[in-house]
Amino acid sequence: MAKVHCKRSLCTSLFAHALVILITLAAMTGLVTALSLAVSAQEAPPPSSSTGPTYNTNSPPSSNSNDQSQDQSQDQSAATVKVNVEVVQLFFNVKDKHGALIPHLNKENFDIFEDGKQQTIKYFKAESDLPLTLGILIDSSGSQTRVLDMEKEVGGSFLESILRPKDEAFVISFDVDITLLQDFTTSVSRLRHALNEARINTGGVSCSGGPIGPQGPIPCSSTGPRGTALYDAVYLASHDEFSHEVGRKAMILLTDGEDEGSRLKIRDAVEAAQKADAICYVLLIADRGFYGFGGYHGDSEMKKLTQETGGRVIEVGNKIDKLRQAFDQIAQELRSQYNIGYTPTNAARDGSFRKVEIKPKDGDYKVQARSGYYAVARQED
């Protein structure tokens, strides 16, 4: 399969993001006119056009379109967690002090607050059978050389065990490149094949000189060559894949958490995941022997990503048994979620971030949920 460093979808998304920053700076130095012309030349496609990744066109066609559209349209009012409907909805887990999942609770067991103000619960249900949209992001940088085969084997088994007929998934690998190995499909065999296509890639693509499309280099850090475009991969999966889907969405990253050379920052990745309503799990797979005396430091940013989106980090190291256990835990959590909904008292759709807290009334329970949502305007507004 041909390896493509970067094509138009990734470049358009990241270039537009970088230009916003440059325009802000230019306004202070009288260069707004010139930069505005540059933005017009690189304008993203209109909202009605597809913005899905085009950086790999060798994937088999997606199998989730016409045959499921009718069922999905009937479920959208209850399944979506976006704010372009009148009710804000969130999926969450409840655990005891030992980390065990707590089932059989109802809305009387909870209060919900937005920006500190209590809200009235309009919808509550234990959702274990709603369709699941899943993204597997697998780190294929040099640090994963001795654990990649383990990730492929256990990841394939996980997909086989968790996916049901109405579920769908995609697979992305990331290293110096970001590659869509398999777009949305319900076929476990295609997903397994995609995982097996992941290959270690340590090619040193310069941050400022890689093949990034006709618009020229994207401004980025000059700290050295790109090695693991982790934050860019999370942004791309969120913005170009999950944002077009509704219902339960989860992203699973198999990585050591070390980013080297992403054009975006961790805050950009977190914001994109929140706007796409994707719960992020990180299976921290670190071959300690690879890092030598200095060790590695990828866990702190991964904790931020997962805590803000309602997932968590699970330490795996390089042990296959721990990886299996981690996937089992994620499967249990995804099939044991509660769904809570409310009509916000603040009806303004001003794009601001609203902090949401779900608090149990009784019991020593811990709620695992996203930290909030962005009050974006409805598409038709």
Image (cartoon, helix red, strand yellow):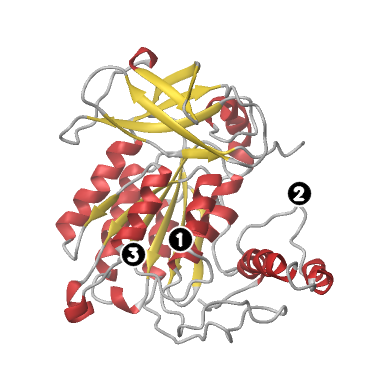
Work out whether 235 lies above or below 338.
below
Q: Earlier in the sequence, mark 2 or mark 1?
A: 2
Quick one: label 2, few (<14), some, or many (20+) residues within 10 Å?
Answer: few
Q: Position of residue 234 (x, y in %)?
A: 48, 59
Work out whether 339 lies above or below 200.
above
Work out whether 82 lies above or below 240.
above
**Amino acid type assigned to the residue bearing label 3 in the image:** Gly
Quick one: label 3, few (<14), some, or many (20+) residues within 10 Å?
Answer: many
Q: Which residue is mark 1?
A: 266
C-alpha distance separating marks 2 and 1: 28 Å
**Amino acid type assigned to the residue bearing label 2 in the image:** Ser
**Amino acid type assigned to the residue bearing label 1 in the image:** Ile
Quick one: label 1, few (<14), some, or many (20+) residues within 10 Å?
Answer: some
Q: Position of residue 51 (x, y in %)?
A: 67, 57
Label 2 secondary element: loop
Res. 282 image quadrant: bottom left
Q: Position of residue 301 (x, y in %)?
A: 36, 59
Residue in the picture at 67% in, 70% down:
8
Residue in the picture at 29% in, 56% down:
283
Residue 158 is left or right of residue 339, and the answer is left
Q: Which residue is mark 2?
A: 48
Residue in the picture at 69% in, 38% down:
377
Label 3 secondary element: loop
In front: 238, or 56? Answer: 238
Quadrant (top left/top right/bottom left/bottom right) for the C terminus? top right
Residue 176 is left or right of residue 219, and the answer is left
In front: 355, or 4? Answer: 355
Work out whether 149 lies above or below 212.
above
In front: 67, or 234? Answer: 234
Q: Which residue is mark 3?
A: 257
